[in-house]
């Protein structure tokens, strides 16, 4: 059974329709990327999965329909969303940011283990525990955002432009850790990226969105070598 | 000198009440960005409820917790049933709703208990202690209750997961939802806590200003001034602000008297106390909108 199935997904901002007919599915364990130009509907797709925009169509998570459910309830099914802009609780400390993220969990022992896991992936955060999260650098805040999603003990992680506004070195580092999280913590990922080359290197599957519709899909290695994709998204 | 100390002491006692009310205002402001103009009359209504229980022969220390719980429920209900449907309404609509609530509770209290003034017994026992010349037992009780209340709230927000979730929901609702926090309920909880704090404030001040439907009108203004001085988003600041306003209003009228005695000129006195509160509001809003203790949030982009 696919981990996530999306069929005929439509999404709206007020009267404006942003998604027309998005179809894709995610196998458990993999990393899938959604590519597309600005305004193609990548972020909207992620937001629709988490119930953050008005959506119609079918979204199934582990076989269970979740379309129209409240964000809080979808999150409780262990869907971690690393939002666009990182969503830092700027006035809370780094530690409080991580503790809020585990708010829904009752298994304190497992939460403590996950916290250790987060520190292993991002040792920097451990040094900054007491610091006000708003004073972290962009890269550190992105690490914190991924860590917050990890503290949910997610089965699926949705990542919205984790490279946005960061220096190439830091992006490399973050993507390396994402690969480790996927392999070691067995977290499936759905990645939205402007940086198509980077995303296609990391992902094993890719879907290409254009004005609210899926126009192409396939193995990342195949999509990467597609003539049209190369010209439009990879720039060579 | 004697008189000066007495004035400061009385100011601190009044300040305790302003502090409580300021705290209630901050509770709602922090979670919803609204100033609840009905806060004062809600507190008045709660004080009447306590009085009613006393009339029925209940012990004060039993009546107060009951009313605090009832007020909490009223607060939650107001948020769920009245404000929730206005989720996306413009600020002005919300303000009108607050003014509506203010009149409703005023009229309700008047209809049930009448508009005549009732004495309200102080719950604190009379006893002798050093400094009794400056502080009455009720004044000491007001100050201690406020401090205990603040410590309880501080502990709640600092050390409990629910308190943390409330802060997170207030700070970044979208991210809080993504952490599974039920943000809507956090707002309702904020309203409930505010109403509960207001109930304590109303009950404590009733023995001082006497019980009548209009009793909180000026006190709300002082509470508002206190909240603004402290920085409308800081609970600790609100309490400090409340005490500052309490002392300031007494000192100003005291020095007004001193000047009048010395020169025969009447500049300011007891009658202008309320104007002092308004003056404080205006001064703070113009000179330091974030308040004395309000944090201008740090953000790196």
Image (cartoon, helix red, strand yellow):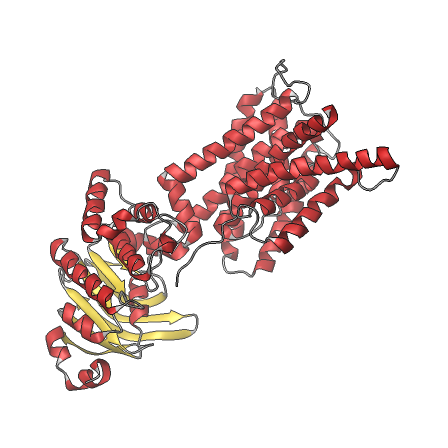
Q: Position of residue A24 (x, y in %)?
A: 20, 70
Q: Quadrant of residue A157?
A: bottom left
Q: Position of residue B9 (x, y in %)?
A: 66, 28
State the residue in front, B135 or B85.
Answer: B135
Identify the residue at horizontal 37%, vertical 75% (top origin): A17
> On screen, B180 above or below B41?
below
User: Where does the N terminus of chain A fall, quadrant-wise?
Assistant: bottom left
Q: Position of residue B239 (x, y in %)?
A: 56, 38
Lateral position of residue A225 relative to residue B79, left or right: left
Q: Quadrant of residue B300?
A: bottom left
User: Where does the C terminus of chain A fall, quadrant-wise?
Assistant: bottom left
Lateral position of residue A199 relative to residue B9, left or right: left
State the residue in front, B147 or B131.
Answer: B131
Q: Position of residue B295 (x, y in %)?
A: 49, 50
Residue A77 in view of the camera: no
Q: Quadrant of residue B213?
A: top right
> On screen, A224 above or below B158?
below
* Tag count: 0
Identify the residue at horizontal 42%, vertical 35% (top origin): B155
Identify the residue at horizontal 69%, vertical 44% (top origin): B277
Of all residues shown, which one is farthest toward the right? B264
State the residue in front, A176 or B99.
Answer: A176
Lateral position of residue B196 relative to residue A18, left or right: right
> On screen, B148 above or below B192?
above
Residue B202 in view of the camera: yes
């Amino acid at each position: 059974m696919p981990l996530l199935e999306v069929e005929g997904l439509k999404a709206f901002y007020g009267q404006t329709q942003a998604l027309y007919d998005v179809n894709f599915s995610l196998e458990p364990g993999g990393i899938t990327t959604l590519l597309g130009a600005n305004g193609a509907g990548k972020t909207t797709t992620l937001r629709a999965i988490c119930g953050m925009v008005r959506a119609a169509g079918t979204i199934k998570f582990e076989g269970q329909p979740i379309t129209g459910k409240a964000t809080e309830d979808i999150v409780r099914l262990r869907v971690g969303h690393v939002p666009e802009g990182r969503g830092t609780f700027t006035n809370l400390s780094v530690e409080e940011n991580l503790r809020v993220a585990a708010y829904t969990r009752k298994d304190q022992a497992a939460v403590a283990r996950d916290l250790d896991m987060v520190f292993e992936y991002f040792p920097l955060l451990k040094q900054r525990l007491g610091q006000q999260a708003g004073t972290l650098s962009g890269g550190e805040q992105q690490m914190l955002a991924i860590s917050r999603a990890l503290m949910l003990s997610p089965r699926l992680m949705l990542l919205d432009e984790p490279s946005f506004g960061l220096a190439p070195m830091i992006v490399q580092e973050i993507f390396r850790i994402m690969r480790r999280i996927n392999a070691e913590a067995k977290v499936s990922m759905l990645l939205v990226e402007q940086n198509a080359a980077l995303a296609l290197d990391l992902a094993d599957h890719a879907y290409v969105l254009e004005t609210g519709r899926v126009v192409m899909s396939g193995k990342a290695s195949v999509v990467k070598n597609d003539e049209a994709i190369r010209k439009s998204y990879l720039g060579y | 000198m004697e008189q000066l100390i007495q004035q400061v002491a009385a100011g601190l006692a009044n300040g305790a009440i302003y502090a409580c009310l300021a705290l209630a205002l901050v509770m709602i402001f922090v979670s919803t960005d609204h100033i609840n103009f009905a806060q004062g009359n809600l507190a008045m209504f709660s004080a009447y409820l306590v009085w009613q229980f006393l009339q029925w022969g209940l012990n004060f220390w039993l009546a107060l917790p009951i009313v605090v719980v009832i007020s909490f429920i009223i607060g939650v209900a107001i948020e769920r049933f009245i404000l929730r449907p206005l989720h996306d309404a413009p600020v002005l609509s919300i303000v009108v709703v607050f003014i509506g609530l203010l009149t409703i509770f005023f009229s309700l209290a008047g209809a049930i208990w009448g508009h005549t003034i009732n004495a309200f017994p102080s719950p604190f026992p009379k006893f002798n202690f050093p400094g009794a010349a400056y502080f009455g037992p009720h004044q000491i009780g007001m100050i201690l209750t406020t401090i205990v209340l603040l410590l309880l709230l501080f502990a709640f927000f600092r050390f409990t997961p629910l308190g943390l979730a409330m802060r997170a929901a207030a700070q970044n609702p979208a991210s809080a939802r993504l952490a599974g926090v039920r943000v809507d309920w956090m707002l309702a909880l904020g309203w409930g806590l505010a109403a509960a704090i207001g109930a304590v404030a109303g009950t404590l001040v009733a023995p001082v200003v006497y019980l009548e439907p209009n009793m909180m009108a000026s006190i709300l203004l002082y509470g508002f001034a206190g909240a603004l001085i402290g920085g409308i988003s800081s609970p600790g600041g609100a309490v400090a602000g409340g005490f500052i306003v309490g002392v300031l209003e007494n000192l100003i009228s005291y020095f007004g008297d001193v000047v009048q005695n010395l020169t025969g000129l009447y500049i300011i006195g007891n009658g202008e106390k309320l104007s002092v509160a308004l003056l404080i509001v205006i001064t703070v809003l113009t000179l330091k909108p974030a308040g004395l203790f309000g944090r201008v949030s740090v953000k790196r982009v």
